[in-house]
Image: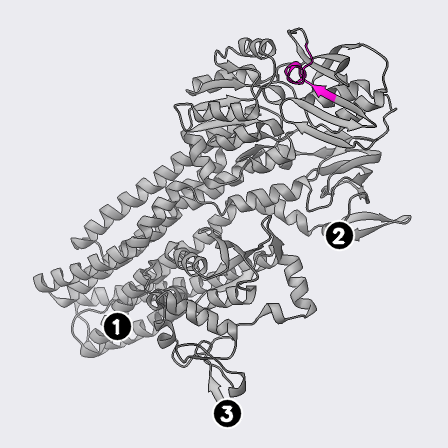
Amino acid sequence: MTKVKCSHCQLKFNENDMIIDEFGEKFCCNGCKQVFNLLRDEGFSDFYVKLGKNSLSPVLNLKTTTSQNTKNFYKNYVKKTKDGFNEIHIIIDGIHCLACVWLNEKILFNAKGIVEVEINASTHKARVVWDENEINLAQIFTLIQSIGYNPYPYDITRSQNHIDTKKRDFYAKLIVGIFATMNIMWIAISLYSGYFSGMDSEIKDIFHFVEFVIATPVLFYTGNAFLKGAIIALKTKTPNMDLLVFSGAFLTYIYSIYAMFARSGEVYFESVCMIITFVFAGKYLEVASQKKATDTIDSLSNSILEEVKVKTGENFELKDPNLVKKGDIVLINSGDRVLIDGIVKNGVASFDYSSLNGESLPISKEAKDKISSGAICLDGSLEYECSSDFENSILNKIINLIQNASFKKPKIEKLANQISAKFSIIVLSVAFITFFGWYFAVNFEKALIVAISVLVIACPCALGLATPVATLVGLNVGLKNAIIFKEGKVIETLAKSKTIIFDKTGTLTKAKLKVINSEFMGNFDKNLLLNLLKNSNHPVSTAIFEFLNDNSFKSIKFDEFKNVPAKGVVAKVNGLNLLGGSAKFMQENEINLSKSKTTNYFFAINSQIMAKFELQDTLRDEAKSVIGDLKRLGFQIYILSGDNENAVKNIAQSLEIPNFRANLLPDEKAKFIENLSDKNTIMVGDGVNDLVALNTASVGICMGNGATVSVEKSDAVLLNENLKNLKNAILLSRCVLKTIKQNLAFSLCYNAITITIAICGFIIPLFAAISMSFSSLIVILNSLKIRKFKGEK
């Protein structure tokens, strides 16, 4: 049977299985055909020329694979989005700089079937969303591999093992570089001495050859990471930092070999070692430093690896948290972390909630208390009934929120990326012009050394790390202080905002209202009112339900039920029309009422008022001090509430806030925010009725005790109920933005000044390598200073 070669993977296959496209190209499978066509359409056809005699793995088609391994893989790593697409988090090994990020994002995003691609330049972690009907996972992985990178699914244990292995590999290469550099410097010192005191030419030749032997493994072993990156840059025509560094070192190496054999001019093998070793040392320290930026996030994520003690019959068995179902009984002992939310059945224990809401003092839990995932048991033990599964637990939602946040790029980072994308091309052009300028002015040797210095000293890496590292540290510090920023751009917008709008109930006031007076106008089944209240998630309904419920509540099924946000609820059962809500809601339904100065709730059956409740809310203890601090920070403050005017006015006067609006519907709050002259606005709320306003504002911030949908739709979440965290979030965002601006200013000034000095011929390659390495480290160390931020408790 005739064998033919696949145009993509270069492997031979049976001619009977051949697929031919309209251009006559031959493929072993549809996957190879799709990848080949995509690379050709994107202008990367020369990739196959550069591939030479090497081959690739053929593109597998996971849709036709029915093995249990594939099913388990999808179950463990692939999630479904709300739109029905597939989503996976992967690590892309081989990314060195922003040019690498740009290339991977471009090649993936332009592939048919890819919906979203986001890559974090600091962690090399990518989030990919795709349509399984258009492209499958094997094709996505092969597409990444085809441009020289190695993707693997993000798994906490595997990722940590990979990082540890990479650090060991880096460490071994660094040791070789340092050892060789120290030895070659002794030889260089001898040669320098011989230059002044005289040295026999044969001895000099021997020294040169030994230097060549020492420099070679440094260039091709320690510098292997730069070599790979440079090859990728050439294949894809996207210059990067690796190309600048390796080309500088390689040109020095080639010239030194020429000088050694021609016995003309000086050799610079020691410069080869120093360029590679110093820059590689900087890369090693970057890896070690960047790990510190994610310690809290990784610590929280590692909790997923823990197992849960689930009651099976009379005994408890260890189970994967993903296998635990709602209603299961879980045992918690001292030292255990709560992974799933629930309600305590029996036992007493104290818990550390600091990783969840920043609460520093232990919190005691006993029978009937709610227990939230993320807490760590300090002492005691208890059993609790799961009120959700792991996927819907608070802990899992926090982990997903913070992981997704690390992919989102702020506007200022996008600007830095645009500069970095062109930076390497500019530097190569400048080095080329510099070489010819010095060549015609002096000689070839001087021109080469100056051009190499220009190539090596330029640092797109510092510019590329200026924003993502600072943002990542900010996200990490925010989590330590019970603040979740869902996107990096939220930090930037929050730092620039000068207008803040508050909802009243549950935000400025305590979430729990208190019934201070009740009045019943006739006989009726109290269970009807209890069911009406139970089906509403408004704080007023919750307060009245707790006030009335004497364990006589029995659930009933309504024929019709409608929750009208910011107004009330309507229901029908057994021919009765039930209505519950505010005075305004009653009037809209043609039930006349007299005005009241307190928050009221009315209950009507068939248009007849049957009960009336007066409630009162109280200011949060910290509200006055926080509002005072926000005013000193220069904020214009508003209160927008659906409550009656007198109730809102009392709170506004207590807080000395002159700007307030009452009796507002959700869309009226949104329109008010839209009409404000300041377009950088912050909305702080906690309920479903705040949802539209939270989405309308530039930054929507939800209190952690708020409705689930509000937490999901907001831009940032305060995990505890303390308003001081709002001030902390603003101060932290300003700290992060200030650090980003410092990093960018330093990176731009560094490159502008050092490249100019290098062009003038005042810097040798040795100092260029040292300078370039330290510039990246300064950016990282400056970003790590954000970790010193201490929020007010």
Callout 3: SS = loop
Q: Using the image, determine if residue 230 lies above or below residue 580.
A: below
Give x and y (percent) for residue 486. Answer: 53, 40
In magenta stretch: residue 587: yes
Residue for point 51% across, 30% down: 729
Q: Residue furthest right?
A: 314
Label 2 crowd bin: few (<14), some (14–19), many (20+), radius 10 Å: few
The residue at which mark 1 appears reads as: 254
Which picture quadrant has residue 410?
Answer: top left
In magenta stretch: residue 526: no
Q: Amino acid at mark 1?
A: Ile
Spatial CA span between label 2 and label 1: 61 Å
For discs 2 and 1, the disc positioned in front in the rendered view? 2
Q: Are marks 1 and 3 in contact (CB under 8 Å)?
A: no
Q: Residue furthest bottom?
A: 1
The residue at which mark 2 appears reads as: 323
Give x and y (percent) for residue 194. Answer: 20, 68
Residue for point 12% across, 61% down: 438
For discs 2 and 3, the disc positioned in front in the rendered view? 3
Spatial CA span between label 2 and label 3: 51 Å
Give x and y (percent) for residue 237. Answer: 32, 64
Residue for point 77% across, 27% down: 572
For discs 1 and 3, the disc positioned in front in the rendered view? 3
User: By what rule are the colours in the image chosen?
Assistant: one colour
The residue at which mark 3 appears reads as: 2
Q: Magenta stretch?
A: 579-592
Q: Amino acid at mark 3?
A: Thr
Point out the tag, 1 or 3, that comes first from the N-terminus: 3
